[in-house]
């Protein structure tokens, strides 16, 4: 499993950068990094962010 930051703001920054630069969507990112999508969504939603599929980013 990929080691991603636990801090919501750092996680937001890392995930959005990876989505912008390397991945067409969250499923591809999670599959490639062997990351838990549910955990990422939970951390970021608790901080007030949701995934925007159209823009491929958390807002």
Image (tube, rainbow, N blue to C red):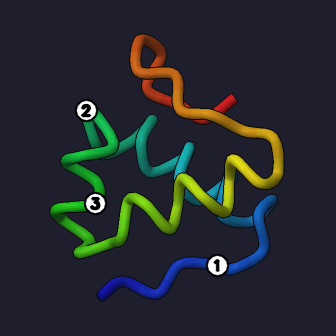
* Nearer to the camera, 19 or 43: 43
Residue name at image x 28 percent, y 54 percent: 29
Q: CA distance from mark 1 to mark 3?
A: 14 Å
Residue name at image x 64 percent, y 78 percent: 5
| Badge 2 density bin: few <14, some 14–19, many ≥20, Cα 10 Å | some
Q: Mark 2 = which residue? A: 24
Where is residue 20 shown, x and y percent of the image?
45, 35
State yes or no: discs 1 and 2 in contact (Cβ < 8 Å).
no
Helix or strand or loop: what does disc 1 sit on? loop
Residue name at image x 63 percent, y 34 percent: 50
Where is residue 3 shown, x and y percent of the image?
46, 87
**Pair 3/2: label in front:** 3
* Nearer to the camera, 33 or 48: 48
Mark 1 and mark 3 lie on one chain; the one further toward the N terminus is 1
Q: Which mark is residue 30?
A: 3
| Badge 3 density bin: few <14, some 14–19, many ≥20, Cα 10 Å | some
Q: Is residue 58 above or below residue 37?
A: above
Residue name at image x 56 percent, y 43 percent: 16
Q: Mark 1 = which residue? A: 5
């Amino acid at each position: 499993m990929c080691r991603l930051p636990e801090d919501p703001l750092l996680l937001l920054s890392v995930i959005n950068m990876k989505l912008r630069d390397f991945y067409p969507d969250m499923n591809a990112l999670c599959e490639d990094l062997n990351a838990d999508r549910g955990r990422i969504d939970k951390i970021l939603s608790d901080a007030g962010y949701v995934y925007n599929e159209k823009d491929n980013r958390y807002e």
